[in-house]
Image: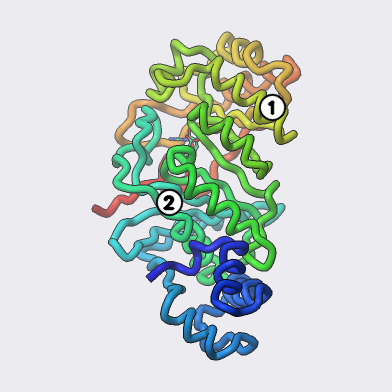
């Protein structure tokens, strides 16, 4: 049976019209599901019996199972979800002063092979569908009884490697009467699949774009991220300019600080040279330890020096603090430890 969560609001309206129902019935059902969190068609009292019967037979409201739920000392919650084919993926709920955000995975495993990231330790077995991404959020909203105000597509997987499903997912969670996550509260993070950055710019969505840069020169980036063999830094910069010009949204460059690898003053200067004048932010991320890798976290001193160097050069920069690292829910630590 098809999943209810695979329908954008417009598609549901079209379906209902085609079946002889009213267009506004789609908003009503969306409201029951995403706002009232009612996952039983029989309880949708303003929907005709006829339509309810149709929905029961044709559009499933099933959600993934929560297999593991861990809460860290900073109140970050990591979920391990299981879908009907037994695929398992993580999602993370984070509490910030400005609201609650959900970090969603886009693929089961990941093929990008970044040398520091736990998510890539398991190769991709399949893409997640739009409905699976939506249903992870809905499940955690119901489980935690919290309203989610922002979504980051930064979990396991490379979202631009699962482009069509991710775009549909964004349209569904953004829809009025739905989860209604504001477009400016949705962030997609990519390792830099250049052609898809152009497509995303042309989509007319205007979500926030974050680029996992991690090095200002190709020589260094090749060593950290195999994707750099396909798309070089200069190409990413061109694509990012296009994205900004098209959407008016400032880009964030994520920059992982790896001790003795990419955290020297000289490299900070090169990073400033690369992005000055670009209207971008740099988000410095402390490396979260992954047992299988030899990297270690930069000292506070070098992290602060790196920050200061960028700041002095007029770059907008923040030094991110870790969330959830005691439960392996921090960046790059997501993976299913079981099977
Ligand atoms: N594939 C996407 C999204 C997943 S990674 C991307 O590459 O952006 C989300 C962010 O976590 C990326 O910036 C990634 O580089 C970073 N990350 C990966 N491993 C990490 C680690 N061990 N410690 C800290 N950040 C890490």
Say above or below: 306 vs 56.
Answer: above
User: How far apart are labels 1 and 2 at the CA level?
Assistant: 31 Å
The answer to which of marks 1 and 2 sits earlier in the sequence is 1
- Can residue 256 be seen by looking at this rendering? no
| Secondary structure found at label 1 | strand
Q: Which residue is mark 2?
A: 327
- Taking 256 as reference, is 251 left or right? right
Q: Which x, y percent locates residue 80?
A: 39, 58
Identify the residue at horizontal 65%, vertical 30% (top origin).
243
Q: Which x, y percent locates residue 202?
A: 63, 36
Say above or below: 39 vs 249.
Answer: below
Please identify the quadrant where the N terminus is shown.
Answer: bottom left
Front in this rendered view, residue 213 or 25: 25
Q: Which residue is mark 1?
A: 280
Front in this rendered view, residue 160 or 277: 160
- The crowd level at tag 1 (other Cα within 10 Å; few <14, some 14-19, many 20+) is many
Say above or below: 110 vs 136.
Answer: above
Q: How is the image coloured?
A: rainbow
| Secondary structure found at label 2 | helix
Residue 300 figure quarter: top right
Q: Which x, y percent locates residue 337?
A: 30, 50
């Amino acid at each position: 049976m098809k999943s209810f969560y695979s329908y954008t609001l417009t598609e549901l309206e079209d379906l209902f019209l085609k079946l002889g129902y009213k267009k506004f019935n789609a908003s009503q059902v969306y409201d029951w599901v995403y706002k009232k969190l009612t996952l039983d068609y029989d309880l949708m009292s303003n929907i005709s019996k006829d339509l309810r019967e149709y929905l029961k037979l044709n559009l499933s409201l099933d959600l993934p199972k929560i297999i593991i739920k861990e809460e860290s000392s900073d109140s970050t919650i990591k979920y391990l979800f299981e879908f009907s084919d037994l695929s398992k993926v993580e999602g993370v709920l984070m509490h910030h002063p400005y609201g609650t955000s959900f970090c969603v995975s886009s693929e089961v495993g990941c093929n990008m092979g970044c040398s520091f990231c736990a998510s890539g330790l398991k190769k991709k077995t399949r893409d997640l569908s739009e409905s699976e991404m939506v249903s992870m959020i809905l499940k955690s909203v119901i489980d935690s009884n919290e309203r989610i105000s922002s979504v980051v597509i930064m979990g396991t997987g490379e979202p631009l490697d699962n482009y069509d499903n991710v775009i549909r997912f964004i349209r569904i969670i953004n829809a009025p009467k739905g989860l209604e996550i504001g477009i400016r509260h949705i962030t997609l993070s990519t390792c830099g699949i250049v052609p898809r950055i152009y497509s995303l710019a042309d989509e007319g969505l205007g979500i926030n774009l974050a680029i996992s840069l991690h090095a200002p020169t190709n020589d260094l980036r090749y060593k950290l991220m195999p994707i750099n063999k396909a798309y070089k830094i200069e190409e990413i910069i061109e694509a990012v300019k296009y994205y900004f010009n098209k959407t008016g949204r400032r880009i964030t460059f994520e920059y992982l600080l790896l001790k003795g690898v990419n955290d020297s003053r000289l490299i900070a200067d090169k990073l400033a040279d690369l992005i000055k004048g670009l209207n971008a932010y740099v988000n410095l991320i402390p490396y979260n330890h992954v047992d299988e890798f030899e990297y270690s976290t930069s000292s506070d001193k070098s992290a602060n020096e790196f920050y200061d160097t960028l700041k002095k050069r007029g770059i907008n920069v923040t030094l991110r603090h870790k969330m959830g690292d005691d439960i392996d829910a921090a960046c790059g630590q997501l993976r299913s430890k079981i099977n």
